[in-house]
Image (cartoon, rainbow, N blue to C red):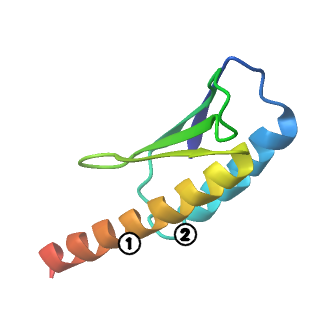
Amino acid sequence: MKINFQSVNFNADQKLVNFIQEKLDKLESHFDNVIHANVYLKVENTNNKENKISEILLSIPGEGVICKKKSTRFEVGVDECVSSLQRQLRKRKKKFNANVA
């Protein structure tokens, strides 16, 4: 799967990129038709501790799936997004298999 990274208001280090790559590679075990992923990481300039936004858009046949989370660390936000995307992909796969059968 091809992954496009965009970081706004900061430069993402290689550790973070590798972490996200590993997490997204696990999604392919749930749904093998993922075309590509767009990952947007943004730091908001606020006084709130939860100022890091992680957004992942998966492009799959039909409609894409998206998840957006706000957290204190990007790793936490990406973990939450991946969990949400796994649920969405399982539902999509069930729906697809029900239509095929």
Residue 63 appears at what percent x and percent y? 25, 46
Relative placement, left or right, of 98 versus 81 is left
Q: Which mark is residue 44?
A: none
Front disc: 1 or 2: 1
Reading the image, the residue beneath label 1 is 90
SS at badge 1: helix
Image point 64% across, 41% down: which residue? 50
Image point 51% across, 43% down: which residue? 56
The answer to which of marks 1 and 2 sits earlier in the sequence is 2
Residue 90 appears at what percent x and percent y? 38, 72
How many other residues sit within 10 Å of disc 1, few (<14), some (14-19) or many (≥20)?
A: few
Q: Is residue 73 above or below residue 31?
A: above
Tell me the amino acid under the disc marked 1: Arg
Image point 77% across, 50% down: which residue? 19
Q: Is residue 44 above or below residue 86?
A: above
Q: Which of the two residues, 32 or 41, is positioned nearer the viewer here? A: 41
Tell me the amino acid under the disc marked 2: Ser
| Residue 10 falls in image quadrant | top right
Q: Residue furthest bottom?
A: 101
Residue 25 appears at what percent x and percent y? 63, 57
Reading the image, the residue beneath label 2 is 29
Pointer 1 with pointer 2, Cβ within 8 A: no
> Distance of mark 1 from mark 2, alpha carbons?
11 Å
How many other residues sit within 10 Å of disc 2, few (<14), some (14-19) or many (≥20)?
A: few
SS at badge 2: loop
